[in-house]
Amino acid sequence: MVDMKKDKNHVLPDSGSTSFAVVGYTVMTIISVVSFIPFWLMFTASISDEMSVLTEGFSLFPRKFSLDAYRSIFRGFEQLLRSYMVTFFVTGVGTLISMLLTSMTGYVLMRQDFKARNRVSFFIYFTSLFSGGVIPTYILYVKYLQLKNSLWALILPCLLSPWNIFLMRNYMRSIPYSLVDAATIDGASDWKTYTKVIMPLCKAGLATVGLFVALTYWNDWYHASLYITNEDLYPLQYLLYRMLSNAEYMKQAAAAGVFLENMVLPSETLKMATAIVVTGPIILLYPFVQKYFVKGIMIGSVKG
Amino acid sequence: MLSPVLAYFIVFSYIPMIGIWLAFTRFDFRLGFFKSPFVGFKNFEYLFKSGILSRLLRNTVLYNLAFLFGGNIVQMVCAVFLSDLKNKKFVKISQNVIFLSYFISWVLVGLFAYALFNVDNGVVNSILRSWGLKEYNFYLKPNSWPPIIIFFQIWKGLGYGSVIYLSVISGIEQEVYESARIDGATKWQQVRHITLPMIRPTFILLIMFNLGSILKGQFQLFYQLVGNNGILFNVTDIIDTYVYRSLTVNFDIGMGSAAGVFQSVFGCILVLSVNTIVRRVSDDLALF
């Protein structure tokens, strides 16, 4: 009797739910494990002994434990520290400016008394449909704006994206519009409504956009590969990329019998340890920020 | 309030559009933008006749189709299972793990591929050796790359895409499932007759819009995985990598611009036509 009562409060059991659960857990376990293998490999390789990697290759479980790779990172610490500063600066400044401009635009576009809002939306949206392409943009940055080897060449390209602007606007639309009307009736200027009414209410939206932008900046190596040749200005991801591609280049040269002067190959374990160090902050922050990204994707997938 | 943003898009998006002109010139850095000799459609003609363009197009389109259908199917599978498995802890861990790859840079993806597939100490080859098999040099074998590239792209987009499908599934009314259960539908039947039909519009929509951008290549993916490895170009060179090389390696600005313009123009036409078709079906779903 007691059992039956319990059952009533429960949802009705499904037939075929056991096979569903078995298949579901199996499939998801496989997908999760396969997804995780690269990360696991990076980690174990970074704490492996270099000789064991060279003779027997990378393996999923370290054959011989060693922290040598991390020790040698700290020996070449200066370059890494400089790159850390570059990335922090670019990410920080870029994200702040981007949040300010994106929220301002989102605000203007959500104001219903702004008559040209559809035309402006299209003006912004069109840039994601059609573009001059990489080469004209490159010439603009290098020849006309003289931004080669300038940190602005890393900040400007990722500053604004139509996607983020519409994400912001969609988020602001969820705020009751009567608040804007009320503020206007009370005599608040447009700016005041923006700073005092809208901004406090869309902190979560702002955080979401900020995180998307910050992630883009942090992971950007591409613009550095176009615009930065000065080693002092290498951002982290580009530093890692250079290390990997130089190693490959030297390997080929050595195989062809060419000896380069000062040829010091970065060890395999060092590559992995560096990868961990340049990704570290993301992995550390991941548990705390992940939910904002989920929210952002959900708002963003609502049509603009 | 709008002026800085408008100025930004004018300078960094609209002004470079003038640069389309480059595609019709034999660009010379010393002569600059306006003085380089005008050659008409010569660059395009060369790209067509040499077969470069058809190779780039074939690779770009086929890869994108594989990414699109493969990616969406795996994402839907994940979303269907994740939304319905009872052990919430398992679901949470699994979701966190598959979302992780979204957060890392493509440089890291390239490094992962290297660690798995390089001939000297890659995981695959060390396993092969320990089984007494011959090693396999992936970086010299073009045919092994399409599956690898497709795998990494699907892997990277899996978390993001399944969040979209999960949010659609969580929007389905529970009563629908409840009444199906009362009628004796099994779990599999519920998935087949309720969940899948409910996420089908999202699937079709995502496919449609991404078909519009089928000429846009995943530059970072290809460049980090394959780089400038000429041996593999036949199956790995896409429009975007060709343009990038013409700027950084070959210095063939006119040719690169021509490929870029081709991509931009036809890409734009594609998106516009997809949008028109979607609008025919339903006004609400159209992008603009």
Image (tube, helix red, strand yellow):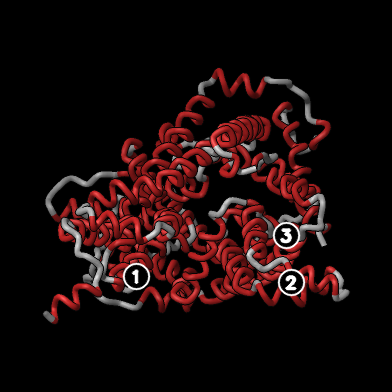
| Secondary element type, mark 2 | helix
Residue at position x 68%, y 57% in the image: A160
**Which residue position is annotated with label 3?**
A110
Q: Residues within 10 Å of mark 3 (few under 14, many from 20)?
A: many
| Secondary element type, mark 3 | helix
Q: Residues within 10 Å of mark 2 (few under 14, many from 20)?
A: few
Q: Mark 3 and mark 1 in contact (Cβ < 8 Å)?
A: no
Q: Mark 2 and mark 1 in contact (Cβ < 8 Å)?
A: no
The furthest residue to the bottom: A2
Q: CA distance from mark 2 to mark 3?
A: 13 Å
From the viewer's side, name the closer residue of A202 and B50: A202
Q: Chain of mark 3?
A: A
Identify the amino acid type marked 1: Lys
From the viewer's side, name the closer residue of A138 and A58: A138
Residue at position x 24%, y 62% in the image: A29
Identify the amino acid type marked 2: Leu
Q: Residues within 10 Å of mark 1 (few under 14, many from 20)?
A: few
Identify the amino acid type marked 3: Met
Do pointers 2 and 3 mark residues of a single chain?
Answer: yes
Q: Earlier in the sequence, mark 2 or mark 3?
A: 3
Specify whether B104 is left or right of B257: left
**Which residue position is annotated with label 1?**
B92
From the viewer's side, name the closer residue of B268 and A204: A204
Based on the displayed image, in which of its 4 quarters is residue A234 positioned?
Answer: bottom right
Residue A73, position as x, y percentages in the image: 45, 74
The answer to whether residue B111 of the structure is visible from this angle is no
Q: Chain of mark 1?
A: B
**Which residue position is annotated with label 2?**
A179
Q: CA distance from mark 1 to mark 2?
A: 37 Å
Q: Nearer the viewer, mark 1 or mark 3?
A: 3
Q: Mark 3 and mark 2 in contact (Cβ < 8 Å)?
A: no
